[in-house]
Image (spheres, helix red, strand yellow):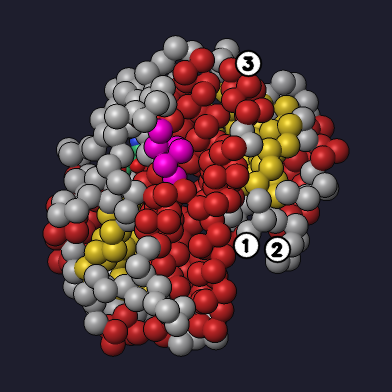
Amino acid sequence: EKGGYPSFMAKEIHDQPQAIADTLLGRVDAGGRLQLDEMKIGEAELRSIDKIVVVACGTAAYAGQVAKYAIEHWCRVPVEVELAHEFRYRDPVVSERTLVVAISQSGETMDTIMAVRHAREQGAKVLAICNTNGSTIPRESDAVLYTHAGPEIAVASTKAFLAQITACYLLGLFLAQLRGNKFADEVAEVLAQLHEIPGQVRQVLDGLEQVREIARYMADTRSVLFLGRHVGYPVAMEGALKLKELAYIHAEGFAAGELKHGPIALVEPGQPVFVVVPSPRGRDSLHSKVVSNIQEVRARGARTLVIAEQGDTAVEPFADVVIRIPRTSTLLSPLLAVVPLQVFACELATAKGLDVDQPRNLAKSVTVE
Ligand code: M6R
């Protein structure tokens, strides 16, 4: 069942190229246009949406945070991302023109179910992004976009996360295409890049021997920090969550821009800090800002483990370790950048002799509030 891998998690990490490819499969027609047949919410309604609210928990909520950057950029519709249990117990402003997107691997997370019910009571349309056919969340939603990651057994989510991000991109591109905004012409180009991603994830996986080795040496580590900006921020949060869940190591992910607003006080000599670096070919000065952040923590003695695009030499003087990912657009880069962090957590937990498939105190689906 584990296909020769030592754990379900290791297998599921290696299944990720397939999970992305299967989530894309059959959704683009011969003319390069997206067709989401399961999208049962009418086109007129989708055109009239003035806000999207993503509700989810844990890793699924980080997929939602990636979606926010992509969908706002492509569709110019405001996207809020909220933990489902927080959304449910306040008085959120939603209306008939709000699209609530509920992301859940299992489709049975009670916190997310309650948020879906609450949203529908307020008159919002709910779209589920879900990995489990016929589960409660899609059944209670107006429409569903299934991720086709296949069953995920390990408690820690990996392939479902990449499939959720992929489905969120499809949703964003679909809305851009439908609403015919100025980005609509670029949809085909992004779809083409998205189809390159499974092969690129495979390349990342094939090049991670160094990460595995480092993880094995770090079994005694007490704390690890993860920094990212823009879409690298949710990637950093997810890297920290994986390490907490699997290796029981204190880990914190934060937006690199926050460093000087407090967290840099944590940095002392020897502190391991992962930094997710955006493409140097991207917009604005995002890349140089993150390079400065690496310098700042390095100057205080941090051990910097830097995830950077192939060919990005600017990071080299300040990195103790450089982990390379292939080139893609900044918005799609989380699908590549998170993979070394998943492998790092899995390997480190294994080196500590822990059960990576069944971490203590956790359940695969959290069916109580
Ligand atoms: O089944 P769901 O996607 O609704 O689950 C949400 C979270 O409970 C889940 O992502 C959790 O955070 C995982 N253990 C993360 O690895």
Name the amino acid type tagged 3.
Tyr
Disc with the residue nearer the chain's start (1 vs 2):
2
Residue 45 sits above or below residue 278 on the image: below
Q: Where is residue 319, by image quadrant?
A: top right
Residue 50 sits above or below residue 294 on the image: below
Q: Which residues are magenta?
A: 11-16
Question: In the rendered structure, are the residues bearing label 1 and label 3 in contact, judged by CB atoms less than 8 Å apart?
Answer: no
Name the amino acid type tagged 1.
Ser
Q: Quadrant of ligand 1?
A: top left
Which numbered dot is residue 79?
none
Left/right placement of residue 164 relative to residue 345 reads left
Q: Residue 275: give x, y in percent of width and height.
A: 66, 40
**Image point 60% across, 42% down: which residue?**
204
Q: CA distance from mark 2 to mark 3?
A: 34 Å
**Image point 29% across, 34% down: which residue?**
153
Q: CA distance from mark 1 to mark 3?
A: 33 Å
Prevalent SS, magenta region: helix
**Image point 73% across, 27% down: which residue?**
303
Q: Quadrant of the N terminus?
A: top left
Q: Which residue is mark 2?
A: 282
Q: Residue 97: give x, y in percent of width and height.
A: 29, 78
Residue 361 sits above or below residue 133 on the image: above
Please state which of residues 212 and 68 is positioned toward the viewer in this rendering.
Answer: 212
Q: Which residue is mark 3?
A: 217
**Image point 48% across, 41% down: which residue?**
238
Disc with the residue nearer the chain's start (2 vs 3):
3
Q: Residue 122: give x, y in percent of width and height.
A: 19, 69
Q: CA distance from mark 1 to mark 2?
A: 7 Å
Q: Secondary structure at mark 2?
A: loop
Left/right placement of residue 99 relative to residue 305 reads left
